[in-house]
Image (cartoon, rainbow, N blue to C red):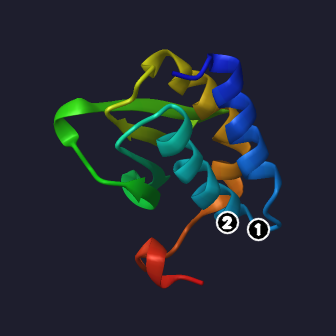
Amino acid sequence: MSTIATVIDAIRTAVEEPLEVDDALRAAVVAIVEEVPATWAGILFAEEGELVLGPEAGSQDPATRVQVPVIYRGERIAELVVDGPGDPTVLPAIADLLAEYCLVGWDTGGIPWEAVE
């Protein structure tokens, strides 16, 4: 299992490489599945009082789900959702790292995430 510092570095590298925020968030959920490790990771965006699924990677296993709020300047803007995390203690730090990306991230107006290019 990776150390917390190794996991955070891997997520930071994943989000800093892409030029577009949506690509950074897609890379982040893939990195979470690979590095935490986890069976599934996704980001739920807070849109008009609802949580809307954005990027995701892996295979869902809701029985092992851990959900962590993504907070930006005191406001919940998203939720980081991870199924089967090897080390759930790293998830709040990942949520903090992703906050600015989630803020810019996404309002699809009801269009499914994977349908938007």
How many labels sit on residues?
Answer: 2
Label 2 residue SS? helix
Residue 66 in the image: state x and y as whole percent.
34, 29
What residue occupies the far front of the structure in this picture? Answer: 1
Within-10-Å neighbours for mark 2: few <14, some 14–19, many 20+: some
Within-10-Å neighbours for mark 1: few <14, some 14–19, many 20+: few
Nearer-the-camera pick, 76 or 62: 62
Label 1 residue SS? loop
Q: Quadrant of residue 63?
A: top left
Q: Quadrant of residue 70?
A: top right
Residue tagged by mark 1?
Answer: 20
Q: Is residue 42 above or below residue 87?
A: below
Disc 1 residue type?
Glu
Residue at screen point 55% across, 67% down: 107
Residue tagged by mark 2?
Answer: 23
Q: Is residue 74 visible?
A: no
Relative side of 27 to 20, left or right: left
Disc 2 residue type?
Asp
Residue 100 in the image: state x and y as whole percent.
73, 44
Q: Is residue 6 above or below residue 81?
A: above
Residue 28 in the image: state x and y as whole percent.
61, 49
Q: Quadrant of residue 95?
A: top right
Discs 2, 1 touching: Cβ within 8 Å: yes
Residue at screen point 53% across, 82% down: 116
Residue at screen point 40% across, 37% down: 38
Residue 90 in the image: state x and y as whole percent.
55, 21
Q: Which mark is residue 94?
A: none
Residue at screen point 43% across, 80% down: 111
Distance between the Cα atoms at labels 2 and 1? Answer: 5 Å
Relative side of 72 to 29, left or right: right
Q: Is residue 22 visible?
A: yes
